[in-house]
Amino acid sequence: MDWTALGLSLRLAAWTVALLLPVGVLLGRFLARARFRGRSLVEAAVALPLVLPPTVLGYYLLVSFGARSPLGSLYASLAGRTLAFSFEGLLLASVLFNLPFAIQPMQRAFAAIPRSVLEAADCCGLSPWRRFRRIELPLAWPGILSALVVTFAHTLGEFGVVLMVGGNIPGETRTVAIAIYDRTQAFDPAGAGAMALALLLISMGAIALSYATTRGRDTHV
């Protein structure tokens, strides 16, 4: 078992979920309510990682993060090292390729709130912020929680983008998915099997916890 790779994968997934929570809530709610020209293009851009081959997405991100790119050179001037093949670059790539897994379920959750409920809140004199905090957020929470769990599990298993952007640097960008590939290539089925089983149990546990939490909440409503 490569505990360092497993720990790095869990850290990457936790940071990705933490960063995508506010982004997903704000953008998901906006897309659920707003009507504007170009909305289809915005939704297509969010959904693009679902259909784009991971190596293609990883290639463009690698070019964007390179030392000669505007973003890469800015990061290098501030941090003193390249964004590509670093944990920070891997985290930024993880946030981008997980956008549809976080935003689309949240968008559907906010869109499912009946318009009459929102109008009733307005009639009661609730401000937009209080309506969001006390009405919309609790009603949309099951969808938000499901989105975060799927994002967490998807980050743990992502391979193509991680390999393209992060490479295989132990302790820095070598996730458990990369470690499983390495063990398989080294004809170490026991090592690969142990890590694959750990990944399976963690993902299954996260999804089961999500279902149990959501079901418990529905029971009390």
Image (spheres, rainbow, N blue to C red):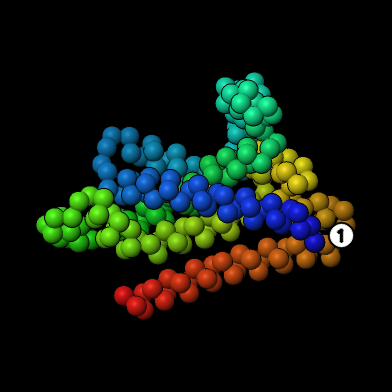
Residue 72 visible in this rendered orientation of the protein: no
For the point 43% across and 45% down, the residue is 23
Quadrant of the image containing the N terminus = bottom right
Question: In terms of depth relative to the viewer, which is nearer, 40 or 84?
Answer: 84
Up the image or down, 113 lies above or below 76; here it is below
Outermost residue toward the right? 187
For the point 35% across and 40% down, the residue is 40
Up the image or down, 98 lies above or below 118; here it is above
Would residue 151 be found to the left or right of residue 7 on screen?
Answer: left
- Is disc 1 placed on a helix, strand or loop? loop
Outermost residue toward the bottom? 219
For the point 39% across and 38% down, the residue is 42
Q: Amino acid at mark 1?
A: Asp
Question: In terms of depth relative to the viewer, which is nearer, 117 or 75?
Answer: 75
- What is the crowding at mark 1: few (fewer than 14 residues within 10 Å), some, or many (at least 20)? few
Quadrant of the image containing the C terminus = bottom left
Q: Which residue is mark 1?
A: 188
Q: Locate residue 66: give its quadrant.
A: top right
Residue 26 visible in this rendered orientation of the protein: yes
Up the image or down, 218 lies above or below 111; here it is below
Would residue 168 be found to the left or right of residue 34 on screen?
Answer: right
For the point 54% across and 72% down, the residue is 208
